[in-house]
Amino acid sequence: MAELSLRQLRVFVSVAHSGNLGQSAEALFLTRGAVSQAIKALEQQLGVALFERRTQRLLLNSQGRQLLPLAEALLAQEQGVQALFHSGALQIPLRLGASTTIGNYLLPTLLAQHWPGEWPLPQVQLANSEHLQQALLQRELDLALVESESLHSELSRWPWREDEMVLIAPADHPLAGQSAAWSALEGQPWVLREPRSGSRAQFDHRVAPQLQRVQVVLELGQLEAVVRAVAAGLGLSLVSRLACQQAIAQGQVSELRLPETLVRRLYLVHPPSSDALPALQRLKGLWSGEQ
């Protein structure tokens, strides 16, 4: 059997992610025919089909799904070898995911102040923590910054920093600026993020169990919309201090002090196959001291 080549694996990984020969050919600066031939040659060498052929799409079958993390790990190790012996800029942008809070309030500063200047900026995807984890498992992202502590067991995690959760209310709320016992929150209307988001998980796990009845009047997919809804008088909410500190300072909403301080951990999460990526190792070093 002929030896497998990194070129074949690179083509395979690209097609696995795009599902389209033409898109992979463009990304790899190859012809469509060369990409198709590389996939056929790889399947012949392995003696199995790796894709299901559908109209205009190639979808990984069970054998392809088994090969993908192994191929990505080998390509990540190749990058590590290149980085060890050759200086210079990272040529392929990282595929970086960020949850809503991090993407809106932390990521711009991270990229401006804590991103290697010789690297191209990453391809960024913003979504809630659950969607980002699914994208990592499907190898659609290299790494993600998430605000959820409920992380998939197949993903590697690295604690990054802490984030305080704050209870906010309309500016004219009777409890504005006061300490609110759990009993004082009974019967209050709540404006919350959508289920499976990191902020919603904090409410469901740390606030809701303290209340006999939870009245959710509105669910929104964006933190800014949640803060604005609270400012408009629609209810209370539990959000990251990062998301509401400006609204509090400007008097648009008020902070209610909870019986206990609620702090959550933010994580950098990635598939185990990304461990060997030199970019990931460097980012851990750069971001470990970031505050």
Image (tube, rainbow, N blue to C red):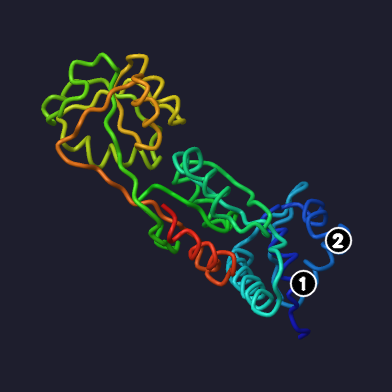
Percent position (x, y) of residue 89? 70, 64
In the image, is residue 174 above or below residue 275? above
In the image, what residue occupies the spot 33% across and 20% down?
251
Vertical placement of residue 18 versus 105, above or below: below
| Above/below status of 162 relative to 38 | above
Name the kind of residue labelled 2 in the image: Leu
Percent position (x, y) of residue 246?
40, 28
Task: Say which mark, if any, is on residue 47.
Answer: none
Which quadrant of the figure contains the N terminus?
bottom right
Q: Nearer the viewer, residue 215 or 232?
A: 232
Distance from disc 2 to disc 1, alpha carbons, whole Å, reads: 11 Å
Q: Which structural element holds mark 1? A: helix
Tell which of 185 and 172 is nearer to you. Answer: 172
Q: Where is residue 138 in the image (x, y as percent from the top left)?
A: 56, 56
Give the left or right position of residue 104, taking residue 173 as reference.
right
- The residue to which callout 1 is attached is 7
Q: Residue at x 80, y 60 (%)?
A: 28
- Report crowding for label 1: few under 14, some 14 to 19, many 20 or more residues within 10 A (C-alpha): few
Q: In the structure shown, which secondary structural element does the residue marked by tag 2 occupy?
A: loop
Total tally of numbered discs in the picture: 2
Write down the quadrant of residue 36 in the picture.
Answer: bottom right
Q: Image check: 228 left or right of 124?
A: left
Three-letter amino acid code of the residue under disc 1? Arg
Count residues near mark 2 (Cα–Cα under 10 Å), then give few for <14, some for 14-19, many for 20+: few
Q: In which quarter of the image is residue 15?
A: bottom right
Disc on the earlier residue, 2 or 1: 1
Q: In this view, does 203 lie to the left or right of 184?
A: right
Q: Residue 57: give x, y in percent of width and height.
A: 74, 50
Residue bearing mark 2: 30
- Residue name at image x 70 percent, y 73 percent: 87
Q: Residue, x 77% and y 74% (percent of image)?
A: 44
Instruction: Say if 279 sits above or below 136 in the image.
Output: below
